[in-house]
Amino acid sequence: MKLNRIKDVLEEKGITQTWLAKQLDKSYNSVNAYVCNRAQPNLETLLQISTILNVDMKDLISDSSERTIKQ
């Protein structure tokens, strides 16, 4: 089950997990667990990731096309 889009955003921006781990001051294994959806970052970490990647937090959780209002 895919709970976040961190992997997708990293790929879109051409950023490695290693680089993100260094920016977050977290281990590669922790970031890899987020990227592979084996673990989920807490809200504070998710905010840090969104700031570092310069994206809206919502974009790390769902694709903008998934957020369209259905009527």
Image (spheres, rainbow, N blue to C red):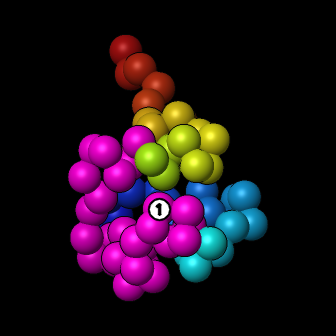
Amino acid type at image mark 1: Leu
Residue 9 or residue 53, whichever sits in front: 53
Q: Residue at x 39, y 22 (%)?
A: 70
Residue drawn 37% across and 15% down?
Answer: 71
The quarter holding residue 14 reads bottom right
Quadrant of the rendering where the N terminus is positioned:
bottom left
Q: Position of residue 68 (x, y in %)?
A: 47, 26
Q: Which residue occupies 55% across, 63% down?
A: 23
Q: Nearer the viewer, residue 69 or 51?
A: 51
Q: Residues within 10 Å of mark 1 (few under 14, many from 20)?
A: some
Q: Is residue 63 visible?
A: no
Query: SS class of the residue under badge 1?
Result: helix
Residue 38 visible, this orientation: yes
Residue 26 percent location from the top left of the image = 40, 71
- Front in this rendered view, residue 28 or 70: 28
| Residue 12, above or below 69 | below
Q: Where is mark 1, residue-wise?
A: 24
Total numbered labels = 1
